[in-house]
Amino acid sequence: MENADVFLGLHDFLDRMRHPSAADFVKAIKSFIVSFSNNAPDPERDSAAVQDFLAKMEAAFRAHPLWAGCSEEELESAGEGLEKYVMTKLFTRVFASLPDNVKHDEQLSEKMALVQQFIRPENLDIKPTFQNETSWLLAQKELQKINMYKAPRDKLVCILNCCRVINNLLFNASIASSENAPGADDFLPVLIFVTIKANPPQLHSNLLYIQRYRHQSRLVGEAAYFFTHMLSAESFISNIDARALSMEEAEFEKNMESARALPSGLSTDLDGLSYQLDKIAGNVAREESKNRSLNSKEDRASLTTETNHGSKEASHSNDQSSITKTPTLSELVNRGAAMLLKEDQTRQVFHEYPYMFAHAGDLTINDVEDLLNNYKQLAFKYICLSKGISGATPSFPLSSSRIQAQQHANTMKEHEGSRATELNFELQKDIDIGYDGSYKVSNEENIESKKVEAVSPEEDNSADTIE
């Protein structure tokens, strides 16, 4: 049954409860909620009481005239509506009701936050054929929605959606590689990896809540299969150690200590940062090659000048070549990125920038002022740095059409500049700044360095609950 069906089932249930003949049902439901809320938390007793009440009420529905002639689907929908209504009312009373549950949640979340920084699919013996971290992000997002809902079924659906995404990806990968269909031994390691990376809030309490308060008659089939795997994943993560990750003990402890060096309370994932640094550093080799080519051209021009124009021009060319070229802003960035990649303590370098590793879900309204101040300081420093190096205010990101137009213009300028150099070398000597290549190179780099970051749409915040 889909979410829309359950939503409609809940409204149908509430509509029937407004009928005068349902007065006894309304009284029984309210009486149960009040008496239940007045008792001290006792998970085992509370679970048994809820299960017994739901079973008795659903049996009464079947015998009541309000549901006379209804199909099995409609009766099932009424049961879902009852469970959703009751558990929404009791949620704050039964969810994470014991201090031990809260402590377990915190310890599990902390462990996942540390391990997620260095774990790789190979550590869980996931076959290369099935490794697809980019597509697994969708499964992570489904799992991270679990705290948006209060009803046991809605929380369970988040887990089922996560598992279905993984299962479909594994199945498609097996078809593409002509391998056997994936089994539980292939599925569970991927689920563990996805869960660690997602680090869903209060995972332990959410699993206990579903286990205790989802109607037992509905926790069967596919739902029971995937839910059991999630329980196994939680157990594995709770007891994770060096052996579980196929690591040496010393390596595992070193990775854990390095992870603890980051600011606490933030979701940390250096994959994106490493990718950006690698990409920036990759420009260094191209830049050096470009500079060598430029220097080679300048050397040849210097040799031609010395031959054709005598010792005076040769001396002037040598003086020009001896002047140290001022590095561009992008060259400094490339150089710094290359140096940063070679450092062992990359995480500690960014320790004073805690938001570097934060995700949107980590931020609160209290962080707005700090972020605004940091942004102003960063923008001011960048403009001052750019002004000091190039003497010009840095340009804003260009649209793709303007970038193409500017690249075409730069190409034409380079061609015209080359022609002018060949036809009138004496003119070049008087306006060296226009043809030393520095402006054209830095301008191209500036265009290449401008990236438009995709902003993910806001998650659907609508929860299928009762106000």
Image (cartoon, rainbow, N blue to C red):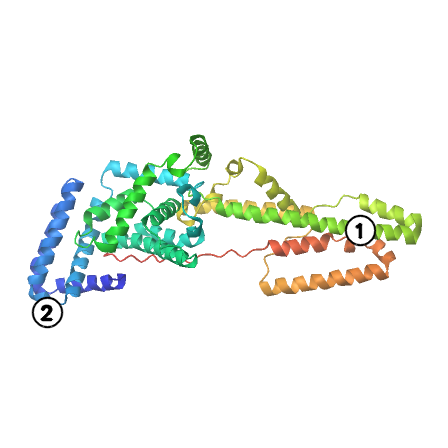
The residue type indicated by label 1 comes to Glu
Q: How many marks?
A: 2
Measured as percent of width and height from the top left, residue 247 is found at 43, 35
Measured in 3D between alpha carbons, the distance from the residue under mark 1 to the one under mark 2, in whole angstroms, is 93 Å
Relative to 61, residue 94 above or below: above
Residue 27 visible in the picture = yes
Q: Is residue 87 above or below residue 322?
A: below
Name the kind of residue labelled 2 in the image.
Gly
Q: Position of residue 437 (x, y in %)?
A: 75, 53
Quadrant where the N terminus sits is: bottom left
Of the two numbered discs 1 and 2 on the same chain, state the one appearing first in sequence.
Answer: 2
Q: Is residue 155 left or right of residue 175?
A: left
| Crowd class of label 1 (few under 14; some 14 to 19; many from 20; radius 10 Å) | some
Identify the residue shown where x is 78% and y is 50%.
Answer: 296
Q: Secondary structure at mark 1?
A: helix
Front residue (pair 31, 335): 335
Q: Residue furthest top?
A: 250
Q: Which mark is residue 69?
A: 2
Q: Residue at x 27, y 61 (%)?
A: 3
Quadrant of the image occupied by residue 10: bottom left
Instruction: Say if residue 150 shows up in the picture.
Output: no
Query: Eyeballing the image, is 459 above or below 118?
Result: below
Coordinates of residue 79 in the picture (x, y in percent):
16, 58
Q: Nearer the viewer, residue 219 or 366?
A: 219
Q: Secondary structure at mark 2?
A: loop
> Could you say which quadrant of the image residue 399 lies in?
bottom right
Residue 281: percent from left, percent from top: 60, 46
- Estimate how packed mark 2 is, as few (under 14), some (14 to 19) or many (20 or more) residues with alpha carbons within 10 Å: few
For residue 298, the mark is 1
Tell me if 149 is positioned left or right of 242 in this view.
left
| Residue found at the far bottom of this picture | 69
